[in-house]
Amino acid sequence: MNRHKVSRRTVVGAMAGGVALAATGMARSDVSAAAGSAFPKKGRLMAQGTPEAAATPGAAPTVVLVHGAFADASGWAGVITRLQAAGITAFAPANPLRGVSADGAYIASAANQLGGPVLLVGHSYGGCVITVAGASIPTALGLVYVNAFVPDEGETLLDLATKYQSPVGVALRPMEYPTGPDSEPGHELYIDQGMFHDLFCADLPAEQAAYMAVSQRPAADVGFGEPVPAAAWKTLPSWFSIATADQTIGLPALRAFAERAGSITADVEGASHVSFISQPDAVAELIISAYNTVTA
């Protein structure tokens, strides 16, 4: 199976504003089709990747916190502390960042093994992941998006990033990674370290941004061109924490995603894309509100 039909030139160029699509000779529909053909048919990965633990009757929900690209689960530390202080169980699994279907299956598998209801929280690309995973978690009670991509079924992140001219596109830098002795190398995307602070986490201290820039987790480029197989926000209630100074996805996109999903919104004034790190009180407050609603 060739997982690299979506070229890094196409993904990086399109994320930067769509100008490279003509240069590569590919229409946006061709990009989506190529990515779609590189993945198993809808439902297959989910069926293979979602073992379930025996449900515990009356179990309190677990808040499952899913990080996005260029970050890791440790970023949820401040939110976790506040959830635990409120008596809420939290779980922050590592997001593999290897593709929408694969990551959705992984998170669904992890959530389904908890043995009880879950409230899914996703940041940035993690919003796309919980949108997919939530459709394969029978015990999912709701979705909380934090400065997140929220695609509809059949859409790609490439579609959304290009449509809304997501600011981060100009800063993406590709690197290769090995996929096996007889396979072509894969490509993953980082944010340029020199642009990381301004674009990703402008409201964090420079020193903190500096070590985040050199420890960022990249995302495989194929994930940006893969059509989303399911959209859980169509059947689950949702909430949306919106950072008003987001320079990664951009405020117009965040508002549009929240409106389409019918989410209950809460603005985090002046916050950057990583408001869950810079203003954990505000983000935790919305999660707790959503938790109280789904458990009422």
Image (cartoon, helix red, strand yellow):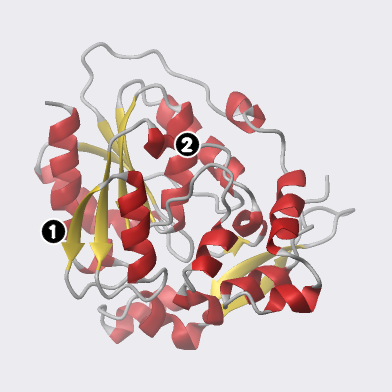
Q: Quadrant of the C terminus?
A: top left
Residue 210 seen in the current view: no
Quadrant position of residue 139: top left
Q: Residue furthest right?
A: 182
Q: Quadrant of the N terminus?
A: top right
Q: Say which residue label 1 marks.
A: 281
Q: Say which residue label 2 marks.
A: 133
Q: Are marks 2 and 1 in contact (CB under 8 Å)?
A: no
Q: Residue at x 40, y 54 (%)?
A: 67
Quadrant position of residue 233: top left
Q: Residue at x 61, y 52 (%)?
A: 98
Q: Which callout, 2 or 1, points to the residue nearer the camera?
A: 2
Return the disc, 2 or 1, that comes first in the chain's sequence.
Answer: 2
- Secondary structure found at label 1: helix
Q: Residues within 10 Å of mark 2 (few under 14, many from 20)?
A: many
Residue 59: x and y in percent read 23, 19
Amino acid type of the residue tagged 1 in the rendering: Asp
Residue 66 seen in the current view: yes
Report the side of 35 relative to 121 (left or right).
right
Amino acid type of the residue tagged 2 in the rendering: Ala
- Secondary structure found at label 2: helix
In front: 80, or 66?
66
Q: Residue at x 63, y 72 (%)?
A: 14
Tell me: residue 251, above or below residue 135: below
